[in-house]
Amino acid sequence: MTDAGQEHALAVDGLHKEYPMPGGGRLTAADAVSFTVPAGGSLGIVGESGSGKTTVARMLVGLVRPDAGAVRVAGRLRETRTPRGASARLARAREIQMVFQDPYVSLDPRLTSRQCLTTALRLHGRDDSLADGLLDRVGLGARESGARPHGMSGGQRQRLAIARALAVDPKVLVLDEAVAALDVSIQAQILRLLGEIRRDTGVALVFVSHDLAVVRHITDEVLVMRRGIVVEQGPTDGVLAAPDHPYTRRLLASVPRPGWDPAAVVGA
Amino acid sequence: MTAPTLAPVGGPRSRQPLGVRVAGGFLVLVVLAAVLAPFVAPYAPDAIDLSASLVGTSGDHLLGTDSSGQDLLSRVLYGARTSLIAPVLLLGLAALLGVTLGTLAAWRGGWVDTLVSRITDVMYAFPGLLFTVLIIAVFGAGMTTSVLALGLAYTPTVAKYTRSVALAECRKPYIDAYRVQGMGGARICALHLVPNLGRSVVGYLVVLFGEALMSLATLSYLGFGAQPPSSDWGLMVQEGQAAVVQGALLPALVPGVAIALVVVSFNVVGVRAADRLGSGR
Ligand SMILES: Nc1ncnc2c1ncn2[C@@H]1O[C@H](COP(=O)(O)OP(=O)(O)OP(=O)(O)O)[C@@H](O)[C@H]1O
Ligand SMILES: [Mg+2]
């Protein structure tokens, strides 16, 4: 923890978000959430529904403005407001990118895969030809390159969403339930792909999931959230093998798919 | 178990209902008539022949003539041109303004949305025809003024509709994805949000088409729109009125029926199109 900031791809300090509740009063969706992720590292955020995982993820990328707290990428503080100027906005985008939960609605229905990528590439002044490499990188072929989202499977769409995030060449990639909408076997493929990408590009991953089995095999560290509060955090293996907090133990006991062991597939 | 259930009607689902096909076929004919009027019309639309005033259907004049002896078939064929082009222009103007305002309101929210919504509400509450006649009173009668005035009168409707579909579209994560990519709001709206509204908005405009045609015909009938010697259908009905007193029905009936058939056809096709385009994909 010495010389913090520089070695961390992502350093989050005291993120806090409250929402007004319909009946009056305020709901704390995230309270004093702090963590760091080293370059090439991978952190999981787990918790039951409504625990504030999405809120944290959206605060990281800047889709939700935190009430308090700071997000630093490679030591640089991110403004909580979206910057006005184009170049500042683009520089900010190159820090953190996001993959959304449902690839059926997170892709522009009008654009083919290749157009989806060239739109992102051009925006960032990069060459169109990089699109082919990106498609290849995520395992999409010539047919998918010219296909629109409705002509692709869920897994293919999520591969494209990952490629779109990589087109910006971010330092940090936030994935909010990125495999939750997919079949189990497709989940394993996507997780393996993410593992490869992390190894090859050194991008840091923040993997939001309610599925502990998924988190176990893609993350080094894990953070357990409950009602906006981080109840436990530490190395994934340690936390999942010997949870300190009773809430984590309950989460572990209710792993949704006991029969599935992604280790067999991902570790292959 | 007690009530007998009707078996669903079989047959290929891609086939359009008979009514839609008939209406669509008729509209194709009308468009062809408008395009080919110079070739299929037996006379010039403004060829006056006082010796053949108010003749009924005959070999020379299939649909008869009006009091000036102008051939009604030729006039109604040429009239299809103004009757179709003017609503297109009018709705084009309403779409340009309405889509811009509606998108702006949905995207910016807050006071921009409040302002746009208030303006559209006020214009909504104001009778469209009254508003139009007011504008015409200021800028003078004529087809151009009518198209501009009705274009403005239809803007709130289009803005309101666009706002509602844009609000739903804005909530889709692909819009968030563009934001996360670092794309500016104006660019997201112009290049990605509005094009994705296109289908729904076009469907809505098709439904409005019949109404727009009717409004224009009404203005011409009242003398605010097309001016003689135009063969605009609304104007023809008005000119034919005097002949009704003299016992000749055709001069008012022919353009009147033309308006009614085209408006009904557009409504039949439009509702179908709105269903298909709005709920598409
Ligand atoms: N825009 C908002 N306005 C009001 N309340 C919100 C808003 N977004 C989230 N919340 C509330 O904040 C809490 C945390 O929501 P969040 O979406 O972050 O949970 P989550 O852990 O991602 O849940 P899930 O697993 O269901 O996706 C919830 O109680 C939610 O109702
Ligand atoms: Mg969530």
Image (tube, rainbow, N blue to C red):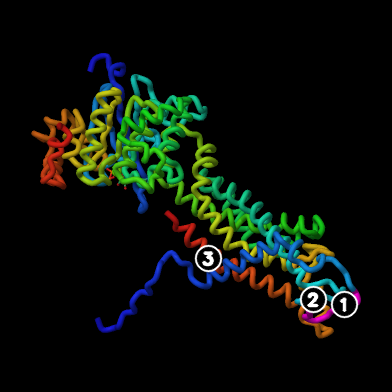
Amino acid marked by disc 1: Ala
The quadrant in which residue A247 appears is top left
User: Which of marks 1 and 3 precedes in the sequence?
Assistant: 1
B221 in the magenta segment? no
Tell me which chain the residue with mark 3 is part of. B
Residue most toward the right? B51
| Picture residue at 72% right of the left edge, 54% below the top | B148
Tell me which chain the residue with mark 2 is part of. B
Tell us which disc is closer to us: 2 or 3.
Answer: 2
- Vertical arrangement, residue A143 with respect to residue B67, above or below: above
Determine which of the numbered discs, if any, sits on residue B271 in the image.
Answer: 3
**Which residue is labeled 1 in the image?**
B52
User: Which of marks 1 and 2 precedes in the sequence?
Assistant: 1
Q: Secondary structure at mark 3?
A: helix
Q: Are marks 2 and 3 on the same chain?
A: yes
Image marks 2 and 1: residues in contact by CB distance under 8 Å: yes
- The quadrant in which the N terminus of chain A is found is top left
Residue A44 falls left or right of residue B73:
left
| Picture residue at 73% right of the left edge, 75% below the top | B254
Instruction: Give the Cα separation between the discs numbered 2 and 3.
Output: 36 Å
> Would you say the magenta stretch is mainly helix, strand or loop?
loop
Q: Which residues are magenta?
A: B50-60
